[in-house]
Amino acid sequence: QKKMILDLDTGVDDALAIAYAVAAPDVDLIGIVSSYGNNLLDVCAKNSLKLLELLGQTDVPVYKGLPHSSTSDHFDVMQVSKDIHGDNGIGDVDLPEPKRALEEMSGVDFYIEAAHQYGQDLIIIPTGPMTNLAAALEKDPEIAHLIGNVTFMGGALTVEGNVTDVAEANINQDAKAADVVLRSDLPLTMVGLDVTLRTLLTKKETQQWRELGTKSGIAFADITDFYIDAYYNLDIDKNGCALHDPLAVGVSLDPTFVTTISLFMKVIYDEHNYGRTIGDKDRLNDPNPNTKVAVDVDKERYLATFMDLLTNLFKE
Ligand code: BDR
Ligand code: CA
């Protein structure tokens, strides 16, 4: 059984990533590390606890990570994040206060402990800024050789960015951290906008959850409908919302959902291209490219699996 850690800035699509990880067979979700991004660190951390309780997963611990990027001393939520994910990060749906408290240990130390304990069995899925993972690598560089796989949602190779012309939101939050991760020896898979923007969910699907009549089915339908409406109203996509974060979870468990190319990826910093992920032209012939970059997706098969897993989960 794979041991999985999610690192989330919870967030509507992060919420769907939690549901996917909980529902997937053969996965032991050993913990969630919290990041900032779609909202403040504390809000994102609490959202993860609330969603776990909604899904009956009170045995999964949530660890707080770092509150802002490695190159800044504070973090403000962007208005566009509130417009897309709601003021509370989860579509302005009110979930009960969680009974379980956050862990005392920091998310950074949890990474290090888990890497030493589980080694190659450990998979890590960052779907927010990679600040926590970068801090863990800097504190204990050895973990790069222990961890089995890191499948991150972030970046773009063949399409434009979503917060600037060149940058995807998660990378843009902390390009320095992404750089630390890309320069490490971690085995990386990049699930970026190239594939996530093509993997859409519509109200036809969320209606199926609503019709289950269960607490989780109705709450997840409400949370996700907010996000689908935002995609429509902000003209991001009129046909549905992107399944960014749950696609990364799916790919980590079944890499055949996507077609990848192996490249030596890097992050650009200069003012005009800040946060851009790009293949390093000087390392095109490197025998050990650092990243498998997803460039195409079998969206029909992924969506069918996603719906099977989540609908069954919400039935309970
Ligand atoms: C990513 O940014 C966040 O807003 C989403 O949760 C997703 O992880 C998409 O660029
Ligand atoms: Ca996210």
Image (cartoon, rainbow, N blue to C red):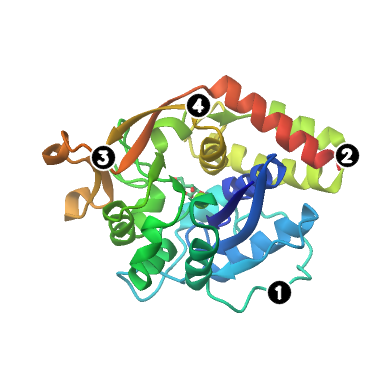
Residue 11 appears in the rendering: no
For mark 4, give the secondary structure.
helix
Q: Residues within 10 Å of mark 3 (few under 14, many from 20)?
A: some
* Mark 1 and mark 3: Cα distance apart in space: 41 Å
Mark 4 or mark 1: name the one nearer the start of the chain: 1
Reading the image, the residue beneath label 2 is 213
Q: Counting residues from the N terminus, which is met first, the one under dot 1 or under dot 3?
A: 1
Q: Nearer the viewer, mark 2 or mark 1?
A: 1
Residues at marks 4 and 1, CA–CA distance in whole angstroms = 37 Å
In the current view of this chain or complex, which residue is farthest to the left?
282
| CA distance separating discs 2 and 1 | 28 Å
Q: Residue, x 64% and y 49% (percent of image)?
A: 18
**Which mark is drawn over residue 256?**
4
Mark 2 or mark 1: name the one nearer the start of the chain.
1
Location of residue 138 by image quarter: bottom left
Of tags 4 and 2, which is closer to the observer?
4
Which residue is pictured at 46% across the width and 27% down the height?
A: 258
Structural crowding at the residue carrying mark 1, measured as other residues with C-alpha within 10 Å and reported as few (<14), some (14–19) or many (≥20): few
Provide the residue designation for mark 1: 101
Position of 284 with respect to 124 (left or right) is left
On the image, the x and y values in percent for residue 114 come to: 54, 64
The quadrant in which residue 74 appears is: bottom left
Look at label 3 and name its amino acid: Pro
Whether residue 196 is visible here, answered yes or no, is: yes
Identified by mark 1, the residue type is: Ala
Say which of 252 and 205 sits in front: 252
Query: Could you tell whether 100 is left or right of 305 in the image?
Result: right
Q: Secondary structure at mark 2?
A: loop
Q: Position of residue 123 (x, y in %)?
A: 52, 50
* Residue at point 49%, 56% (across, down): 119
Disc 4 to disc 1: CB gap under 8 Å: no
